[in-house]
Amino acid sequence: MQTVKMVISGAVNSGKTEFIKTISEIEVVSTEKKATDDTGKIKDKTTVAMDFGRIAIGNDLVLHLFGTPGQKRFDFMWEILSEGMLGLIVLVDSTRPETFRETNRIIDFLSRTGIPPT
Ligand SMILES: Nc1nc2c(ncn2[C@@H]2O[C@H](COP(=O)(O)OP(=O)(O)OP(=O)(O)O)[C@@H](O)[C@H]2O)c(=O)[nH]1
Ligand SMILES: [Mg+2]
């Protein structure tokens, strides 16, 4: 049985927590708290540390799913969560072009720190 660490990232409100809750086979460990800054204008709750879920693919592979917080002020968690990751999924809300620049920043950062070279 092989276990692979996957990181699910993306800008605020791109759907990271929802994605992990949807595909995880276990109850997701979530750290959602009431948003107290500008994020509160678009949603009630936001991830402040991480999400964690798990899904098995066939009999031999288990994916551990680590969701990052979207807010910039929690970006120190990106490096912590991406340590040892083998795969990265970046979610984008295509209806909010104003988040594309931030999405690029996340991709740049995580491709430099996390994914091992092939
Ligand atoms: N229409 C639609 N709404 C979605 C989808 N995924 C998530 N949402 C909604 O988008 C909002 C944000 O979803 P979250 O999963 O909290 O987003 P997040 O990326 O974890 O947000 P942060 O933790 O604040 O960065 C919620 O209201 C979800 O119900 C989707 O695929 N389609
Ligand atoms: Mg979240």
Image (spheres, grey):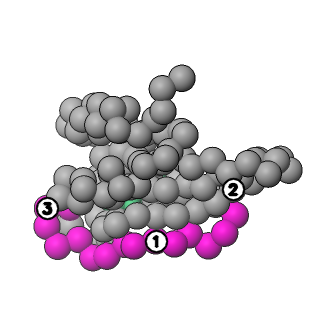
CB-based contact (under 8 Å), mark 2 and mark 3: no
Question: For numbered disc 2, what is the local secondary structure?
Answer: strand
Classify residue 77 as left or right of residue 24: left
- Whole-Å distance between the Cαs marked 2 and 3? 33 Å
Question: For numbered disc 3, what is the local secondary structure?
Answer: helix
Among all residues in the image, which is located at the extreme left?
A: 37
Q: What residue type is labelled 3?
A: Asp
Q: Name the residue under label 3.
A: 38
Q: Is residue 86 visible?
A: yes
Q: Mark 2 points at which residue?
A: 55
Figure quadrant of residue 109: top left
Between 51 and 78, the one lying in front of the other is: 78
Could you tell me residue 59's position as x and y percent? 86, 50
- Whole-Å distance between the Cαs marked 1 and 2? 16 Å
Tell me what residue is drawn at x 41 percent, y 48 percent.
Answer: 82
Tell me what residue is drawn at x 13 percent, y 67 percent.
Answer: 37
Question: For numbered disc 1, what is the local secondary structure?
Answer: strand
In the rendering, which numbered label is found on residue 30?
1
Q: Which of marks 1 and 2 is nearer the N terminus?
A: 1
Could you tell me residue 17's position as x and y percent? 46, 60
Tell me what residue is drawn at x 20 percent, y 67 percent.
Answer: 40
Q: Which quadrant contains ligand 1?
A: bottom left
Among all residues in the image, which is located at the extreme bottom?
A: 34
Could you tell me residue 96's position as x and y percent? 28, 39
Could you tell me residue 76's position as x and y percent? 24, 56
Q: Which amino acid does label 1 sit on?
A: Ser
Figure quadrant of residue 69: bottom left
Which one is closest to the eye, mark 2 or mark 3? 2
Vertical order, 52 against 70 (above or below): below
